[in-house]
Amino acid sequence: MTEYLTTIGLEFHAELKTKTKIFCSCPTDAGGEPNTHVCPVCLGLPGVLPVLNRHAVELAVMAGLALNCQIAEYSKFDRKNYFYPDLPKGYQVTQYPMPICHDGYIDLPLADGAVRHVRINRIHLEEDAGKLVHSGEHIQDSHYSLPDYNRAAVPLIEIVTEPDITSAEEARNFGESLRLILLYAGVSDVRMEQGSLRCDVNISVRPADSAALGVKVEIKNLNSFRSVYRAIQYEEQRQRELLAGGGSVVQETRLWDEASGETRAMRSKEDAHDYRYFPEPDLVPVVIDAAWLAEIAEKLPELPAARQQRFESELGLSHYDAGQLVISPPLARFFDAVYTLFPEAKTVANWLLGDISRLLNESDAELDAVPLDASEFAYLLSEVKKGAINQASAKTVLEEMFRQGGKAAEIIAAHGFAQISDSGALQAQVEQVLIANAQPVADYRAGKKAALGFLVGQVMKQTRGQANPAMVRELLEKALESEN
Amino acid sequence: MSERRIISRDDAEHVARLAHLRFTEAEMTDCMEKLGSILEYMQELQKIDTTGVAPTTHVLPLTNVFRADEPGETLPRERALANAPAREGGSFKVPRII
Ligand SMILES: [Zn+2]
């Protein structure tokens, strides 16, 4: 049987986190009434002049730095011409021959411990299109469309990889890794389900003994990395079967259908890709000199790989625990804030990945959206460490702070959770228990050491769980041994 | 000039189709001639030796013209839709594509 190799390249569009559009001062917030976040510039009315949003340039450069790209000292804008009603001007302003970033990469860790070096060809700045609302149930049976230009000209970066990816698994991992990097860099919300991050796939298949790449198919309409994974698996199989049966793959764009789990050929016009790019005369070139580049680089936060490395090698967390923290920026930030005040990494990680993660799952919330305060939590951990409060009470205090905020010390006091660690007070409790439990005491003295556990339990019960168990054990042992 | 056929009939029709333009026979001939003369001028320019000359990407001696990322005024929706040939509620209305 012929073996086949799969070659995959990915294209991402990420909406930049600016307050305003790329060439005008309309707001970028989603959710407004249709056609209310528009102005003469983003509607493409005659006689207007676009002016570039400086922050969009900075975010694009930041994305480039985060993805190990070269930053172009000189870049410029071009018009990509095509007619589609989501594009009010009849062209999209983008960057064609001179993108703002080029030649980057992500080193993707593979399951077997090796690394896949996936090259990034380019990152360019461009404007988003509007949204078309169709009149019928399905696009096929609608007779007209209702364009909403609120999203038109929201700044985007397009990130294009080289065809260095070889499987559905790698493509999904690459996507997730890229998403996390952009999230850490703070350049985009990267919410695939809301369209602030989009991914298209270019895929071809060829027999293993053939040097030339196979015919490339583009897959669109992928709304999650799970869809990316499934669509690649489907398309890989479809193309292999075509080739194995003596057929050939047609170069085309196919749409992923989430419900049926298939890709379908998209009807397209033959001229669809004749974009007749030419330089945008209304926008002047962008020059990023060393000083500006250094200023932007200065603002770049710690990235996921660096944080993972720091958690493992500096703080001694396991690879797994570090990975679990790094994958959620709010969790990782909270970890750092608590660790500064309570520098026992393993303990902090256990609480975060245990009880706090459970509470987050139950309430379907992100850690930065709940009232739990890092310094109060650190105080709680130090009280546990001192033996001033036991583990079970600490969990109750944590839950209360998680739901309502508040100060750990006040909650401990309000519940009467302070653990009895005063040896005088405990000694009295121990003596009472010894008198009330003559049989276990006799058993212990006869050599049944297991009776000690029962006696510790009795003291705990009598103090409603507030006794310091280690001290109780010690006091009991002392009393039982001495009076023997 | 037109007999020199700098631009072919096929090219002219292709460009017209991309621009969503439909021409009569006479208009097409006229367009081909005019486009041809523009292209001919370009051929003249291409004869110039540009060795050692940096490519021009923009005609203005300006770079880095920016605006701050601060929200400004938007157009009231009624005004935004004022020139729309067709509308429905708060939206433009256009024929379905594809
Ligand atoms: Zn606008």
Image: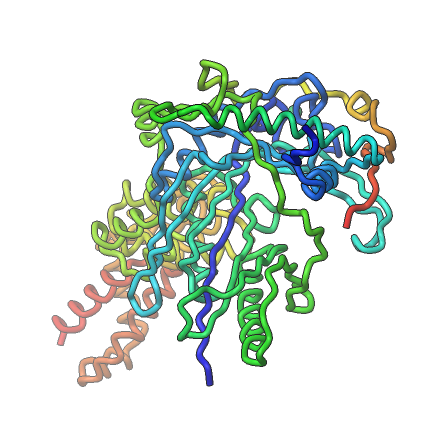
Quadrant of the image for the C terminus of chain A?
bottom left
Instruction: From the viewer's perspective, tell me whether residue A145 is left or right of residue A279.
Output: right
Residue at 29% in and 55% down:
A347
Note whether residue A417 is visible.
Answer: yes
User: Which image quadrant for residue A379?
Assistant: top left
Instruction: From the viewer's perspective, tell me whether residue B39 is left or right of residue A422.
Output: right
Q: Looking at the image, which is closer to me, A107 or A461?
A: A107
Note whether residue A379 is visible.
Answer: no
Residue at 55% in and 75% down:
A243
Residue at 68% in and 47% down:
A271
Q: Looking at the image, which is closer to me, A469 or A242?
A: A242
In which of the image's four quarters is ligand 1 placed?
top right
User: Please, is residue A128 above or below residue B81 in the view?
Assistant: below
Q: Find residue A8 and report its horizontal and vertical position in percent.
A: 47, 61
Residue at 83% in and 28% down:
B84
Q: Find residue B42 and report its horizontal and vertical position in percent.
A: 55, 26
User: Which image quadrant for residue A22?
Assistant: top right
User: Please, is residue A179 above or below residue A126 in the view?
Assistant: below
Q: Looking at the image, which is closer to me, B52 or B3?
A: B3
Instruction: From the viewer's perspective, tell me whether residue A80 is left or right of residue A373.
Output: right
